[in-house]
Image (cartoon, rainbow, N blue to C red):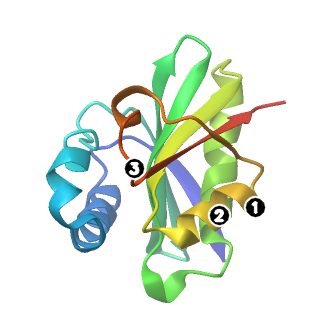
Amino acid sequence: MLTCIRTNSSQNHFQQLVRELDADLKVRDGEEHAFYAQFNKTDRIKHVVVAYDNETPVGCGAIKEYAADTMEVKRMYVPLHRRGQGIASLILEELEKWCRELNYNKCILETGIRQPEAIRLYEKNGYARIPNYGQYTNMDNSVCFEKKLG
């Protein structure tokens, strides 16, 4: 049975999943990995969701404040062998619920052009492409999204 827990970035299973995510991104991003990695530090993330199948961690995601009304979705990851089972959508749904509870009305995020499965996930969950923001403005390999929370 799939469940999600809310925690913070010091949680061991979250850290384990982030290490797997970073290893995957290092391959996908190639020479640009160092640029992206500097924006993916987890030490200041206070809002983390870890998904479990019984007691096995099977995915994670996080949110951090971007602006007074906006949270940025970060560190979304589901191991390859667990993809296609609705885990990432479950995590995203829990993150969005948490955002609403904290009185934020919008989520934004950045993903890579080399992550077509992530792009499909966000589009399937109602995220719309927006111009690249902040540090991603001139990055051709970045794709940014936004979702207004109702």
Q: Nearer the viewer, residue 103 or 148?
A: 148
**What is the spatial separation of the Cα atoms under label 2 and label 3, in whole angstroms?**
20 Å
The part of the image, by quadrant, that contains residue 30 is bottom left
Above/below status of 129 relative to 67: below
CA separation, marks 2 and 1? 5 Å
Q: Position of residue 66 (x, y in %)?
A: 47, 22
Q: Residue at x 27, y 45 (%)?
A: 10
Secondary structure found at label 3: loop
Q: Amino acid at mark 2?
A: Leu
Task: Name the residue: 47% across, 23% down.
Answer: 65
Q: Which badge, 1 or 3, is on the more N-terminal residue?
A: 1
Within-10-Å neighbours for mark 2: few <14, some 14–19, many 20+: some
Looking at the image, do the residues carrying marks 2 and 1 touch, with CB atoms under 8 Å apart?
yes
Report if the CB atoms under discs 2 and 3 are less than 8 Å apart: no
| Residue with the mark numbered 1 | 124
Q: Residue at x 36, y 36 (%)?
A: 138
Q: Is residue 86 above or below residue 81?
A: above
* Residue 97 sits above or below residue 123 on the image: above
Above or below, 97 against 64 in this view is: below
Q: The residue under label 1 is which amino acid type?
A: Lys
Q: Secondary structure at mark 2?
A: helix
Instruction: Give the residue at x 23% y 36%.
Output: 43
Label ID, residue 140: 3
- Sequence-wise, the earlier of marks 2 and 3 is 2
Identity of the residue furthest to the bottom in this view: 81
Q: Position of residue 90 (x, y in %)?
A: 67, 61
- Marks 1 and 3 sit apart, C-alpha to C-alpha, by 23 Å
